[in-house]
Amino acid sequence: MERRLAAILSADVVGYSRLMGVDEGGTLERLKACRRELVDSTIEEHHGRIIKLMGDGALVEFASVVDAVQCAAVIQRGMSSRERGLPAEQRIRFRIGINLGDIIVEGDDIYGDGVNIAARLQGIAEPDGIFISGTAFDHVVHKVDAGFSALGEHHLKNIADPVRVYRVLLDPSHLGKVVFASRARSRAMGLLALVGLSIATVAAVVAWQWPHKQRASIAVLPFANLSDQTQDYFADGITDNLITDLTRLSKLDVISQNSVFAYRDKPHVLADIRRDLGVRYVVEGSVQRMGDLMRVDAQLLDTESGDHLWANRFDRRGTDVFAVQDSMSRQIANALGLNLTPSEAERIARPPTANLEAYDYYLRAEQAARTGRRSLMLEALALFDKAEDLDSGFAEAFASDAHATAYVWRSAYDDVLQSALARKRTYDKASRALALDPELPSPYAVLAIMQVVDRRYEQAIASAQKAVALGPSDAEAHMAFAYVQLISGNHADAVAAVEKALRFDPNPSAVDRYTAGMIFYLQRDYERAIDSFKRAGYGSQGNGEFVTPLAMAYVRVGRIDEARATVAEAQRLLGGRDCLAAWRIGNAHFRDEDLAFILDALREAGLPEWPFGFQGDEQSRLKGAEIAATVMGKLLRGKTEPSESLALMQVQLDGKAAFRSASQMMTEKVSVKGDLLCEQSENAFGRPDCGPVYRHANPADQTSYAYVNSTKVFYFSAAQ
């Protein structure tokens, strides 16, 4: 095994998947041109050796770290001029990390921490940026045509020791300069290290500095996990619970979990955080578990001055996790000059559960549920069940369970939990959480969503108002209130509520961006609707389910070609499943005039009436009596689009039925309404899903009819 000291450059393309999704061919051609005309030749000129190329990145070895940094600077400066003429969302932008360290050489590949640190630095660099390690900085300072900004020590994922990080400053005005922390910040850090400033003293200073008329605002950034990757969920739990505790303080505005988790494994550049999240203060820290012991480091920083206002290390047993969280919350409140009311102090001190095994299952469930991915939601619900079985009084577990189940229900993840079962579970879990702890805002927010979809408008508004009253800085509560007002037709109130939600959650989930977009659309604020829908469908948390609505906003501003291209892209992402019938049944709880305003635009954008672009011959369409004679009391054999898998529908004379295919099995009620065949099951929010039946003789597969509704095209023949 060969080892050597080398400079490693790791680079990748920012938002590569999004760029490919928007324009695959164009992105590939421009990326190839970048490599051919700039990147490869620059690497060669600076004596670099390309180790490997990925679709969106590269790993390069240099014998000289000066060459590596000079090479990176030339590439980033060249890219800024190449892409200048394109819209910001279409530009190819690199981020680069460089480290000088020991590597392991095996054949043509390299391994080791020397490589890993470069990759981690690249991962936290901002677009168009270059981040280098302290070892690299020590060898290149004053030797390259660039400046440097010291970002302090960072805990990089799966790297045992903290790493000094520097940003390379490419502007000519910074040439030869090294920008360190301010004197005030350095002096505060020195005093902390040398004499251990007391928390009380810091609190007094902060209280004197902070204007009393202004509410304090804070973001708790994801605590770094310094243990192995299997402990990520535990570090996330520390972050979540600290946010929850601070949210309970009436004089403090706290950014939601969703927005801060966008900063996981990224640099904590205070000026950027202040701008993006709109906060004065930031908490950051790390967690390390060592057998039965744990170490939690945390610090409070002022984003305006860069000063460290409070810091502490907690070396405790794992069983003391709640005591550590309580201490952190109190000490941060003290450092901010906040006087806790007796009820606030009691809420913070109250542990969520006395059962640490239940707490562990709860944290794992939260980690799985946070992804929103269909594949992990079933796992999340099972883990919540285990936590609740171990502690039937664990209110937060029931509340989070209700939130996750509502997401499954709202997303129509019928393969995770069928609609009727998800609906019942959501109501049951939310009600149980409130019976255990009536002061939790989340269950009220969940109930508000469920009630408004069930068209229980007055109850929904009351639940949403209760959620906001209990959680005035809870983004989920404000978003629930916004959704209730949207469905109730109170669009101006919905806009006001969503703006409050975005204040506490500036980087919301795809489903919340979709909700915001729908509110702006129905309020006729089309530019904000376009921005929200774009971010929902194509953003970092993008979701193909939310691409189609962008088309209706384009229609309203006359961008018809873009609207039709958007529908085509959505159909590609969703396999042709999206259709007007699905929108009609999925949004049946909207006011009639609002639903019509949505459907009319989607129709103009080219969204088909039925899935997979099905179009029937109206001359071959069956009347109601013909449908009944063909279907009721019969066994229907055939196939479904698009997989052409075999399917059976057994329909009794009384309408009780069962449908089976390779991917679906359900019991349902079948009926004929007018000239439509209707299925009603636990799916589709329990609503009847109706569609026409056509004669469609096809000797090749021996089918005689075609039945279509919002989810299927079923070609079949009938037998007794």
Image (cartoon, helix red, strand yellow):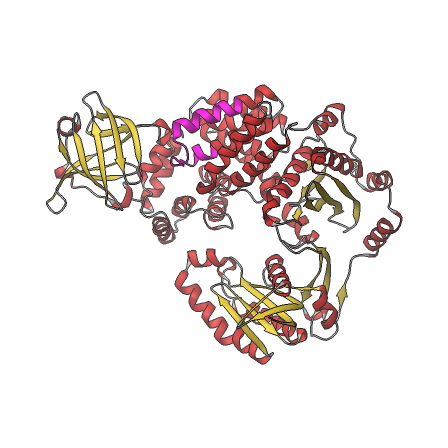
Q: Position of residue 685 (x, y in %)?
A: 38, 29
Tell me if I can see residue 170 in this picture. Answer: no
Q: Residue at x 52, y 75 (%)?
A: 40
Tell me where residue 338 appears, x and y as whole percent: 78, 33
Tell me where residue 435 sits by quadrant.
Answer: top right
Q: Is residue 79 left or right of residue 67?
A: left
**Residue 422 within the magenta-colored segment of the rendering:** yes
Residue 559 left/right relative to 294: left
Quadrant holding the N terminus: bottom right
The residue located at (70%, 52%) in the rendering is: 270
Residue 229 position, x and y percent, is 59, 49
Residue 201 in view of the camera: yes
Magenta stretch: includes residue 322: no
Number of numbered discs on residues: 0
The spot of residue 428 in percent (x, y) is 49, 22
700 with respect to 578 (left or right): left
Residues in magenta? 406-431
Q: Is residue 131 above or below residue 703?
A: below
